[in-house]
Amino acid sequence: GRGRGKEIFGDGNSISVHRANEKRPREGRGGRGRGKEKNDDFTVVVRGLADWLTEQQLKSDFGSCGPLLRASVPLDGNGKCKGFAYVQYKSEDSVQRALEWHNTWYKSGNITVEKYGEETKGRG
């Protein structure tokens, strides 16, 4: 069991190790998902859509509000629209235009258009 005694002596070092490990405010970090194209700027959530609505249809209609970055229509197991979709624009004024469609008749019923990330606020 020689060489084991070394560890006891080595203990004096652990003091300096702890110091280096002190919690520093993490600055310059927190660029989560940085460098990725996908962010949620200028994104709206559209709800109340018909189940037969396609992404193509959505793009052509909501594209009238301004240039689209992307539009996605989540489908259920049967390939039908789940009744909501995400539309991302390239600028804030396109978003504002899309928001004017809130509570209007679209295809088969009234839809709600809300800014992504804001529609969850205020729900317990």
Image (spheres, rainbow, N blue to C red):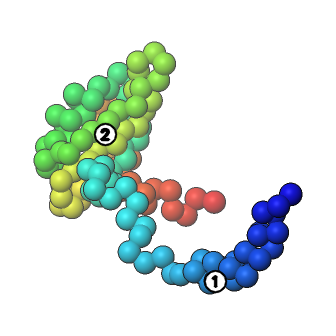
Q: Type of residue at label 1?
A: Ser
Residue for point 16% across, 34% down: 60
**Res 16 label:** 1
Residue for point 18% across, 53% down: 90
**Res 80 label:** none
Give the percent coordinates (x, y) of residue 7.
77, 69
Mark 2 surroundings: few (<14), some (14-19) or many (≥20) residues within 10 A: few
In which quadrant is the N terminus drawn?
bottom right
Q: Type of residue at label 2?
A: Trp
Against 71, residue 91 (above or below) is: below
Query: Could you say which is closer to the camera, residue 96 or residue 28?
Result: 28
Closer to the eye: label 1 or 2: 1
In the rendered view, does 3 fall on the left or right side of 22? Answer: right
Cα–Cα span, label 1 and label 2:
68 Å
Q: Report the residue that reaches farthest toward the front.
A: 2
Which residue lies under the disc numbered 2? Answer: 105
Give the percent coordinates (x, y) of residue 93.
18, 61
Mark 1 surroundings: few (<14), some (14-19) or many (≥20) residues within 10 A: few
Against 99, residue 59 (above or below) is: above
- For the residues bearing labels 1 and 2, Cβ distance under 8 angstroms: no
* Quarter assignment of residue 116: bottom left
Against 56, residue 66 (above or below) is: below
Q: Report the residue that reaches farthest toward the right.
A: 1
